[in-house]
Image: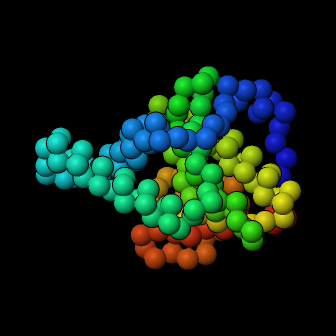
Amino acid sequence: MKKHDGDQEAFRALRLRPATSEDEPFLMNIFATKREDELALLNCDEHQKKAFIAMQFNAQSRQYVMSYPDAHNSIILWNDAPIGRLLLDRGECEFTLVDVALLPTHRGAGIGTHLIEDLLLEAAAAGKPVKLNVWYSNPAKKLYQRMGFSAANDDGVYCEMFWNPGL
């Protein structure tokens, strides 16, 4: 997998930094933006929606720490402003893209594609496959398929996908 030199220039303002506990409100906001469609269906007030989001975010965060204790939790920056999160576990046998999320204003601009291309280049150099799980109806599933990921397991809610170097 080779990236075009022009791609690097277009994404010069993009970088990652380690997430800290001070990023928790931002990470919860990112989480909430991914759940907006779901929340619109709930018949409850804003206070109840915020409580629901906080509960779900905390449960997800605990699950990530338990399942991927060595994962690198990064904040995606554009011109030093936080625009997303990348959670990546570089395991001994494979890389697991645990979570990648962007603020709605930065989705569809090629940023996610760029980050995943970098990840695939790193994985290919290490000779390791990349695994991820995506919500079945998440539009990103099509992006992953275009980038060479194949569905392995599909339970109707989540789809486990793999990318193998050299394929």
Q: Total label count? A: 0
Res 46 visible: yes
Q: x and y percent of residue 79 in the render?
A: 61, 22
The residue under the point 47% across, 38% down is 23
Colour scheme of the picture: rainbow
Q: x and y percent of residue 16 in the render?
A: 65, 37
Q: Nearer the viewer, residue 89 or 39?
A: 89
Q: Nearer the viewer, residue 58 or 110?
A: 58
Q: Is residue 159 above or below residue 70?
A: below
Q: x and y percent of residue 124 in the render?
A: 82, 58
In the image, taking residue 32 as reference, residue 86 lies left or right, namely: right
> From this viewpoint, which residue is outermost toward the top?
79
In the image, taking residue 23 as reference, residue 41 lies left or right, namely: left
The residue under the point 17% across, 42% down is 47
Q: Is residue 44 above or below residue 150?
A: above
> From this viewpoint, which residue is outermost toward the front?
21
Res 137 visible: no
